[in-house]
Amino acid sequence: AADHAAARGARALAQIFPVASDRTRREPGAVSASLDRLWREAGIAKPDAVISGATGVSAATAEEFEALARLTPGVAVTALGDVTGHGLEVTAPFGAALAVALIAERGAREVAVTTVGHHRGEGVLRLAASD
């Protein structure tokens, strides 16, 4: 992507890596276990920031934040809904766009974005600086 951007006279603002996703049955502990697995699958090491697509559905959101506290101790977690409102289908693209801004404009090296749906569906995106 960086080569393609350079050929057009543009600069790549960030890299997005393959998205990891799952669809659990939402039994107790399922969201946390899913995020643990997806985090590893996405290859996230130590992000500078986390953008959470938390929906506010109490059980799923509680598990998401418990998992994030364990996976990223001391890292700032921003709930996307606090910034953009709760848009459901646009959670991943809005989260990715904000992650790019954190990388391109604020100097973050790696940003993680989570998406945990109301009923089912979990995802983790990894974005990093283009070197």
Image: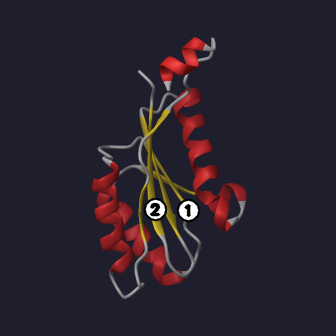
Q: Which of the two discs, 2 and 1, labels the residue nearer the N terminus?
A: 1
Rendering quarter of residue 4: top right
Residue 23: x and y in percent read 43, 74
Q: Which residue is mark 1?
A: 53
Q: Secondary structure at mark 2?
A: strand
**Residue type at tag 2:** Gly
Q: Is residue 111 above or below residue 59?
A: above
Q: Is residue 41 above or below residue 103?
A: below
| Disc number lying in front (2 or 1) | 2
> What is the CA distance from the residue labelled 2 to the residue labelled 1?
9 Å
Rendering quarter of residue 10: top right
Tally the numbered discs: 2
**In the current view of this chain or complex, which residue is farthest to the bottom?**
27
Q: Quadrant of the C terminus?
A: top left
Residue drawn 55% across the image and 67% down it: 54
Q: Residues within 10 Å of mark 2 (few under 14, many from 20)?
A: many
Q: Nearer the viewer, residue 52 or 89?
A: 89
Residue 126: x and y in percent read 42, 45
Report the disc number at residue 123: 2
